[in-house]
Amino acid sequence: MTAQELYGQILRKQSFLCVGLDSDIKKLPEHLLSAPNPLFSFNRAIIDATAAYAVAYKPNVAFYEALGASGWAQLEQTVQYIRQHYPELFIIADAKRGDVGNTSRLYAEAFFSTMNVDAVTLSPYMGRDAVQPFLDYSGKWAVLLALTSNPSSTDFETLPLAGGQKLYETVLEKSAGWGTVDNTMYVVGATQAAMLAGIRKIIPHHFLLVPGVGAQGGSLQEVVKYGRNEQVGLLVNSSREIIFADNGHHFAQAAAEKAREIQKIMSYELDFRQSTC
């Protein structure tokens, strides 16, 4: 999927919502726990309920890996289900990989060839050779951590360097030349929304994956204000606020209502953007 194709999906749905499938087995509705594949059963219901309002899904791999082979199998089932029933949707494996070249090649093969996701989140801090194997796959995306929303991101990401730039700014500037706007996007936490304007000066045309809206306290309106570009350029992720909106038999209906609520706000923001640009 190219950036233009992703933008087309955003316009068609009037949404730039990415639903995070952080499917914690400890938070699943109790009636699903007796199912043979509870994570997949939960995900399938969430996907069916929210697909009309989302352009992307982002399973966080940790919640599946923690269950061993069964969890990994249910992650594969989830990806296959989206591919079969909603092939237009963008799938991001939130795996945060990043290793030496030969290992990265195998990680890229695992996620792009074996599992067939569209994108993988990566740490760029080992340099280009840790990211390049992912960029070598045509039609696939590397999603690089840039400015994250966790409290200790300031330990390294915002450290000033000798030339005056902060570390994350140098990472953005350097890594933007590794790939293109059609295979590279960046993670910027919603709680860092005020810093998005500066980030847009460095990478004006790349897509940004923005987690942290909702349960983590990020403001969707602020993200749009500072982070949008001429083709929206945003995938805003919401996880817990949607998928755990209810913990009973009506969990899917509650997820749909929350996703629709967010999509309506996004639709307004898109209308506003188009009327002022």
Image (cartoon, rainbow, N blue to C red):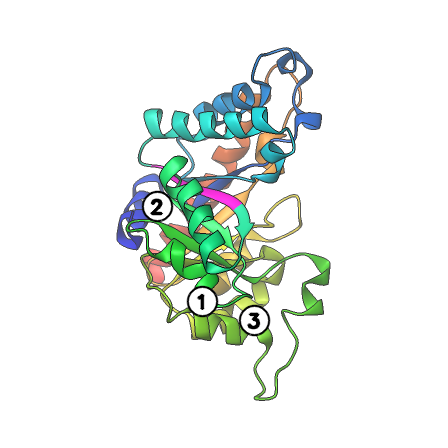
Left or right placement of residue 60 versus residue 101 in this view: right
As drawn, 109 above or below 177: above
Mark 1 or mark 3, which has the lower sequence index? Answer: 1
Any part of residue 232 in sight: no
Give the crowd class for mark 1: few <14, some 14-19, many >=20 residues within 10 Å: some
**Does the magenta-highlighted stretch encompass residue 90?**
yes
Residue 168's label in the rendered image is 3
Of tags 2 and 1, the one toward the viewer is: 1
User: Circle 1 sits in a helix, a strand or a loop, which is it?
Assistant: helix
Q: What separation in Å lies between label 3 and label 2 (alpha carbons)?
A: 28 Å
Residue 10's label in the rendered image is 2
Residue in the image at 40% along x and 44% along y: 109
Q: Nearer the viewer, residue 96 or 152?
A: 96
Corner quadrant of residue 230: bottom left
As drawn, 3 above or below 200: above
Mark 2 or mark 1, which has the lower sequence index? Answer: 2
As drawn, 79 above or below 223: above
Residue numbers of the magenta segment: 89-94
Residue in the image at 64% along x and 25% along y: 246
Residue in the image at 48% along x and 70% along y: 172
Q: Nearer the viewer, residue 39 or 270?
A: 39
Residue 140 screen position, x and y as percent: 34, 49
Residue 152 screen position, x and y as percent: 72, 62
User: If the image is split into quadrants, where does the C terminus sit?
Assistant: bottom left
